[in-house]
Amino acid sequence: MLETATRTEAIDLPFTYGFDDVALVPGMETVDLDMCDPTWELSPRLRFDTPVLAAAMDGVVDPPFAAEFHRQGGLAVLNLEGLHGRYADPALIYCRIADATPDEAPALLQELYAHPIDENFVRAAVHKAKALGARLAVSATPANAEWLLTAAVEEGADAVIVQSTVTSAYHRSRSGWSLDLAAFCGCCAVPVIVGNTVSHEASLALMEAGAAGILVGVGPGAECTSREVLGIGMPQISATREVSDARDEYLRSTGRHVSVICDGGMRTSGDMVKALAAGADAIMLGAPLAKAEEAPGLGFNWGMASFHGTLPRGTRIKIGTTGSLQQILHGPSSVNSGTQNLVGAIRTAMSVLGATSIRELHKVRMVHAPAIKTEGKTYQINGNL
């Protein structure tokens, strides 16, 4: 009689870290605040005073927001498959989304985003942003990248993003068609950012295909439910470190620097500093910027997969309006929660940590510190402020 085999060995799983799991340790040196330079460069022609991108979310970016975000030193990303690519004037659509109840919102988003994408609307939205003075990035999924992103570049877009929940350099398909990423990057007249991914091998392949930047993050955003729906992802600190290790390896072998952009999961300026210290060259924000008075979402935000026709992987969230974009990015702050004067906080942290540049910030010591937000905070935790 055969004995039934049983599996008793321990599963060997590597430990991974999110923002709340780590802390940054000051070292031997501090520097003057005015010596701290948080600028970020996607290409020699695209240099930004603020290492922040505004996410390709309809609740965050429309043409006027993109122009104001440019004036504040950052780069906004317009979603070409969003409302501005489907409607000539989405103002009333935004009102319908804001007025919907939580139970009504998922079906309403599916209905509104079932409207077809119109290349004329895409061109008009990009043209409007450029006419308002914005340096602008635009985003489309791999299936629509060639025609939509090409049209946007013809209207003056400064960078393009090929973006989906998970992007890889290789795709198997029964239809035999998939985007030739290397060919697209090779012929595109502007830098191509690709994402999202979380692993060393996948990001290295995307760099070898010609990507100028890599978006890091699967499912960490406040509006995203991919982790719950699909069970995929990796905590952002570990993911950023893994992709930035691939960047450094690629730089050593080719001499070409590819920007690593941490996308999602950052709630406060402290999280943003940790993302940069983990190896990111810049960060992409959604919900923190959707709180701005200039954001088109009327105090709401929703992810790019919230309106999927058969499997929504996001939700509409109410986040309110807390201040102007100037106040959120550069202050002055009226709160002590780390949600305003974000760039000022990054520069202050750089000063304390002795880093005069983002690349120097990459060298700061990081430790596992699960008690970093609770140690000594009895009165805050118990609400006795």
Image (cartoon, rainbow, N blue to C red):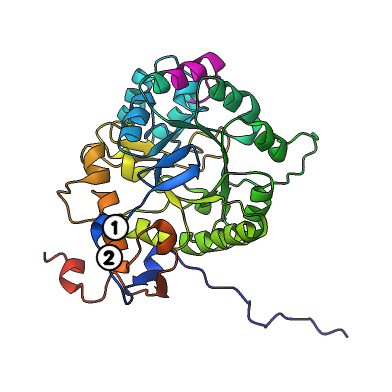
Q: Which percent across, then down, holds residue 114?
A: 53, 24
Report the residue marked by disc 1: 35
Residue sitting nearer the eye, 131 or 19: 131
Secondary structure beneath label 2: loop
Report the residue marked by disc 2: 31
Is residue 296 visible to us here? no
Relative vertical location of residue 65 with respect to residue 25 in this rendering, above or below? above
**Mark 2 → mark 1, Cα distance in angstroms:** 7 Å
- Tell me how many marks there are: 2
| Label 2 packing within 10 angstroms: few (<14), some (14-19), many (20+) | some
Q: Quadrant of the C terminus?
A: bottom left
Q: Which percent across, then down, holds residue 369?
A: 37, 75
Residue sitting nearer the eye, 1 or 75: 75
Mark 2 and mark 1 residues within 8 Å of each other at the beta carbon: yes
Q: Which percent across, then down, holds residue 353?
A: 32, 68
Relative placement, left or right, of 356 versus 199 is left
Q: Quadrant of the N terminus?
A: bottom right
Question: Main SS of the magenta segment?
Answer: helix
Relative placement, left or right, of 224 versus 5 is left
Quadrant in the rendering for residue 293: top left
Residue 148 is marked as: none
Magenta stretch: give its range.
Answer: 113-127
Relative vertical location of residue 58 with respect to residue 197 in this rendering, above or below? above
